[in-house]
């Protein structure tokens, strides 16, 4: 402020009538006092008087521009500071503030030359000026120069939290994470309310795979900056990393509300939705992401995956092909594309992609398993067995390869080998009901009825709604001459088979009714839902769908009755009550 005051003293003796000079001097002192008290509106009003009374003096315009800049009124601040700079090119405070104003308006072509002018003159910038200058240098691709400038600035002002935060950010940008972290921590120790430092430290901890610590910092950042979409986006990423998808979705939805144009927030939300199984809701967000990031192979791959998960494998293939052009050496991409081909029963396409993936990553157990599965579906049993054995060799902890090998060995009559593989699968996962069922069938083929009965007993316990284990157990009991036991198991199997068929019929009618309801054909939909209820009276979803259709028909009493039936059925299985 001393340089501005000297400017006004010059005005007193040379530039204006004594009365105007006196009034300008009084207004300037009042403005200065208001600035010292952080009363920016009062300061602005006083400096407005100064420039009216002494329009040709740079100091008044410089002071007014500084206040307007502090208030965030960038356009009028720029006008005043530009005028001050032209009236007095030697006023370094006006020059620096003008450069900052241009920088905050993202006018690098005007800002950077002014900063360089000050730099060449070895003018020590304020912390705000140094941060803005470094930002412009980064935009110009001069990262090393930005780091060097901020390092020097920190040496001059070691107690500036903003400078430490800015230097840490530049270091992190260069992946110098070990060097960056102390600067973020120092910034927080100097000013624990500095939201940007919390955000940057939390993001760094996330990169370092320290998710719980990242959540703590980023949660604080969102409290300090509740309108920061970036803070909520990073918090969402950290919560995903900790497995807390529920809170992650909440944070990310809030981020997209705060900044609906943020592609990063939308993309991260799409990933969280995909993780939680909400594939259809994720799809439009992925589509918006790839529209904005046309050369982002990861976004394209995740869009393709969401399409496959939503039953749109055919539409996913062109998306995967675009991603493969951008990232041809991505084994996971090849695996996902192979699965898409597999869903379309294009076994040759699936095999081609799985093999392409293995060329990139030959030790990928999942790719070997997928290839074996494709060969199995193509009835290339020797090739399937070889691929599955390799999958098991690459990762002995996977349960699917030994199970599928057991099924294949059983199909080709290698029962001892089949039993051995199925026992491996069960040892890895004791609640593998299908493996117990298949093992019981294998033991039955090997004339080991005691082992078969024991394995099938486990299968029945784990798969209570499936008729197959009961039917196979009936065969085993028949061999043991347990006629009554065999008959009882056979009856259970037949009853479960009828239930399965009835549920299948009910689902078909339910799907048809939903289609009709969407078309507005309410009466026809009611008929389909009634068919579903008749096919499977214990199916709560059918009663709920019928209740909805009856409500639309205006039959409130009938709808309420159906809803009560649905709620009673849901309570029987411990499900939450239906809501209107």
Image (cartoon, rainbow, N blue to C red):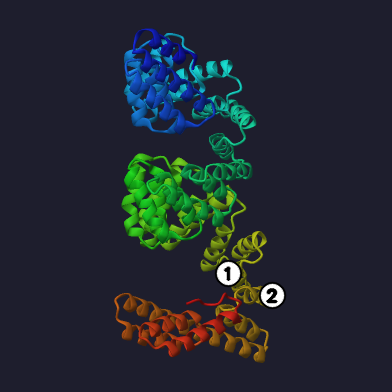
Residues 363 and 22: in front is: 22
Check disc 2 and report its element: helix, strand or loop: helix
Residues 162 and 9: in front is: 9
**In percent of the image, x 44 and y 47: which residue is there?**
265
Picture coordinates of residue 277, whole percent (x, y): 48, 60
Residue 551 visible within the image:
yes
**Which residue is under mark 2?**
454
Residue 337 visible within the image:
no
Pointer 2 with pointer 1, Cβ within 8 A: no
**Which residue is under mark 1?**
434
Image position of 566 (left or right of 97): right
Picture coordinates of residue 4, whole percent (x, y): 44, 15
Q: Is residue 91 above or below residue 528?
A: above
Quarter of image, res 145: top left
**In percent of the image, x 55 and y 64: which residue is there?**
409
Q: Estimate the spatial distance between the alpha carbons at disc 2 and disc 1, rounded to whole Å.
A: 14 Å
Q: Is residue 204 above or below residue 374?
A: above
Image position of 409 (left or right of 229): right
Picture coordinates of residue 130, whole percent (x, y): 48, 21
Residues 407 and 220: in front is: 220
Picture coordinates of residue 33, whole percent (x, y): 51, 24
């Amino acid at each position: 402020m001393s340089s501005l005051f000297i400017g006004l003293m010059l005005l007193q003796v040379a530039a204006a009538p004594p009365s105007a000079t006196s009034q300008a001097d009084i207004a300037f002192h009042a403005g200065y006092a208001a600035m010292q008290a952080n009363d920016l509106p009062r300061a602005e009003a006083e400096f407005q008087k100064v420039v009216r009374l002494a329009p040709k003096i740079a100091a008044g315009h410089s002071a007014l521009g500084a206040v307007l800049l502090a208030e965030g009124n960038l356009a009028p601040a720029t006008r005043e500071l530009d005028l001050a700079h032209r009236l007095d090119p030697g006023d370094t405070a006006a020059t620096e503030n003008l450069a900052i104003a241009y920088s905050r308006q993202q006018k690098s072509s005007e800002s950077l030359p002014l900063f360089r002018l000050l730099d060449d003159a070895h003018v020590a910038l304020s912390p705000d000026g140094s941060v803005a200058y470094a930002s412009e240098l980064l935009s110009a691709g001069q990262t090393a120069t930005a780091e060097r400038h901020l390092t020097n600035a920190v040496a001059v002002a070691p107690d500036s939290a903003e400078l430490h935060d800015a230097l840490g950010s530049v270091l992190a940008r260069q992946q110098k994470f070990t060097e960056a972290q102390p600067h973020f921590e120092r910034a927080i120790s100097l000013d624990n309310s500095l939201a940007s430092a919390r955000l940057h430290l939390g993001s760094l901890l996330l990169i370092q795979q320290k998710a719980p610590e990242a959540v703590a910092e980023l949660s604080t950042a969102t409290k300090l900056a509740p309108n920061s979409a970036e803070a909520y986006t990073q918090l969402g990423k950290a919560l995903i990393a900790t497995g807390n998808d529920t809170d992650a979705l909440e944070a990310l939805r809030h981020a997209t509300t705060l900044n609906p144009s943020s592609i990063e927030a939308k993309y991260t939300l799409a990933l969280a939705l995909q993780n939680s199984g909400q594939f259809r809701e994720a799809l439009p967000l992925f589509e918006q992401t790839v529209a904005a990031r046309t050369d982002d192979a990861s976004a394209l791959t995740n869009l393709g995956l969401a399409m496959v998960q939503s039953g749109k494998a055919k539409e996913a293939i062109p998306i995967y092909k675009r991603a493969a052009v951008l990232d041809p050496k991505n084994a996971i991409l090849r695996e996902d594309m192979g699965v898409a081909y597999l869903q379309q029963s294009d076994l040759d396409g699936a095999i081609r992609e799985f093999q392409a993936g293995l060329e990139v990553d030959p030790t990928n157990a999942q790719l070997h398993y997928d290839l074996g599965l494709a060969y199995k579906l193509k009835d290339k049993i020797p090739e399937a067995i070889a691929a599955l054995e390799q999958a098991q060799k690459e990762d002995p902890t996977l349960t699917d390869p030994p199970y599928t090998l057991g099924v294949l060995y059983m199909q080709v009559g290698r029962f001892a080998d089949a039993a051995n593989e199925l026992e491996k699968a069960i040892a890895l996962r004791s609640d593998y009901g299908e493996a117990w069922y298949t093992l019981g069938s294998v033991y039955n083929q090997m004339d080991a009825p005691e082992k078969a009965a024991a394995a099938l007993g486990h299968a029945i316990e784990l798969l209570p709604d499936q008729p197959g284990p009961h039917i196979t157990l009936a065969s085993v009991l028949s061999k043991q001459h347990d006629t009554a036991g065999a008959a009882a198991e056979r009856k259970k199997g037949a009853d479960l088979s009828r239930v399965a068929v009835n549920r299948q019929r009910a689902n078909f009618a339910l799907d048809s009714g939903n289609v009709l309801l969407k078309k507005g054909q309410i009466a026809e939909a009611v008929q389909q839902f009634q068919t579903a209820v008749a096919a499977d009276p214990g199916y709560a979803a059918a009663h709920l769908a019928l209740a909805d259709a009856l409500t639309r028909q205006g039959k409130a009493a009938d709808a309420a009755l159906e809803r009560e039936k649905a709620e009673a059925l849901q309570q029987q299985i411990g499900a939450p009550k239906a809501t209107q």
